[in-house]
Amino acid sequence: MTAPESTSTELVTPSPSGYLTFTLHAHLPYVVNHGTWPHGMEWLLEAAAETYLPLLRMLGRLERDGIALHCNLNLSPILLEQLSHPVFVAEFPHYLERKIMAAREDEAYFGSMGEHGYAETARFWQRFFVDSLDQFRYLNGDIISSFRHFNDKGLLEIITCGATHGYMPLLGTDESLRAQVRMAVKTHERHIGQHPKGIWAPECGYRPSGFWNYPVSNADGSPIAPGFERIGVEQALSESALDFFFVDTHLVEDSAPVRSPYLPAKKVPAASGDRKLYQPYFVDGPYEGLDKRDAATVFARDPQTGVQVWSGDSGYPGDSNYLDFHKKRWPGGHRYWRVTGHGVDMADKQPYDPHVAAERVKEHAAHFVCLVRDAMKECLSTEKPPILCSPFDAELFGHWWFEGPLWLEAVARLLHEKPEGLELTSCSSYLEKYPRAGFIAMSEGSWGAEGGNQVWLNPDTSWTYAHIYAAELFTREVCSKGEWEATELGQRVVKQMCRELMLLESSDWQFLITTGAARDYAEMRFNTHNGQFNELKEFWQVLETTGSLSAEQQERLGEIELRDSIFADIDPGFWASGARAVRE
């Protein structure tokens, strides 16, 4: 008997001809217990209300409808420590309540003045912050658990970052580079419950292995220390079993001029005719003690699509219908005006309409999908699809560009409903399906202005590195001897010394000094951590000599520990000479 013909109507999903991967870099420097307004805790509170919770609401809507963003989300270790800190968990509801009250007062004022449009926007802000407060209470104050939910469901992938966002090309010892990576992995595992597969190298900073001299001198002009053969970033990542990281366009394409996401691009180059930017590569290097089959993989930032998303001058955030970031009504700080136009004076800003802005988001999402497809048009293939990498600071979405989370949602929905051969993916998912394009050797660089180290090392910031290098060398010396383990007091002093060193290494201080965004605060914070490090150094030297600390010194030690209570499981052994992670 002849078998009956199949009557199955099961649909076969066509293979994508190209992939898009968003990478959102969520990070703030450590601000808990270090000031409130205008700089300090206010940054964290604003970011939580305007970026982290709106992103979670957006991800929840997508999950409800069976859609995934599949982005790579970096929650930096120092951000994880802050979002879980008791001070933040206690203060955030009060912040939201203040914003709700301010919006109610604004509504009453505008209503009394007959400004019904502004009064309606005030009600919009009330709903926005009430939703945030309800959401935070529903989560029992645990924002991290909600991000972890989407990670565990495979709807996005959480990756890590340098522990305190230390700028890797300028770290002064191999031990400090490795400690930034090892402490990041350890913190990620504690908060997320999994070993991270990828990492956001702070500022997309990369350095190859090779001989290196300290770029600054001591205050008296003497050398910091002799030059030495240092490891490359890829070595530290591979040792810690981190599979991939990201760099700026020019490090892979070797093209000029170099573009930075921190400066407006005057001209966007045409896409190259090959796949160079749209495939991952193994990073070449000595890989001492490792198998090159465990080499780290690099993804390059796409410049064309990037400028459309982050530029306030020529990109989507500058659209006249979107909420203006700068003009606020005090004392509440709510925003009631739209961008209106490039260069429009503050006094001439027009009223904001959230409904009009939400419709504009859909148009920009469709435009972006066309840009992505056009960028990869010469290399689209179902056999080995190219991948376009779009990395951004997460705080762009919601805080700087209020409609940003809605735009991400619109892109995800558009690709889900009308994929046009394109599909969203995470980097690790792509690497599970497709091979790397071979090995490449890269030069040192970043995504900062001019593509090098200039944003972090320049005449305004060089003094900070003299202090950082001295602290790194002293920490390595103390941790290498191992005597700190002998007493509980010795452990406390040296562990806190390592914490202060890591806070000192944060690239945020140099960035804020260079850009002038919060120079006084950044200089104050750097000097605070440097001063506390030197206090702890003195405590250690007293302990070495006398075996004890005075009551006043122990009290001061407790104050520093309480103020900078990060990385409870910090291990000074990470800073011992030659210490490295053992890849399993």
Image (cartoon, rainbow, N blue to C red):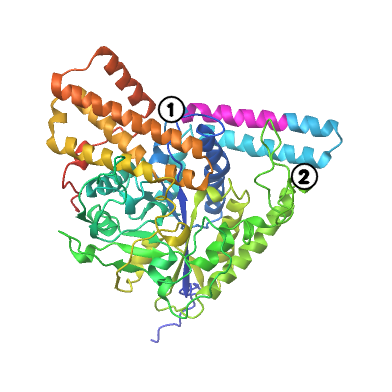
Q: Quadrant of residue 540?
A: top left
Give the residue pinned by disc 2.
Answer: 347
Which mark identifies residue 86?
Answer: 1
**The stretch drawn in magenta includes residue 294:** no
Q: Amino acid at mark 1?
A: Pro
**Farthest bottom residue in view:** 2
Query: Could you say whether the residue bearing mark 1 is in a helix, strand or loop?
Result: helix
Instruction: Work out whether residue 468 or residue 119 is closer to the camera in this orientation and state it.
Output: 468
Residue 158: tell me if it is visible.
Answer: no
Residue 470: tell me if it is visible.
Answer: yes
Q: What residue appears at the point 62 percent right and 66 percent down from the top-left corner? A: 366
Left or right position of 486 against 177? left
Q: What residue appears at the point 16 percent right and 47 percent down from the top-left corner? A: 578
Mark 2–mark 1 Cα distance, whole angstroms, equals: 41 Å
Q: Quadrant of residue 83?
A: top left
Q: Quadrant of residue 164?
A: top left
**The stretch drawn in magenta includes residue 103:** yes
- Residue range highlighted in magenta: 88-104
Q: Give the crowd class for mark 2: few <14, some 14-19, many >=20 residues within 10 Å.
A: few
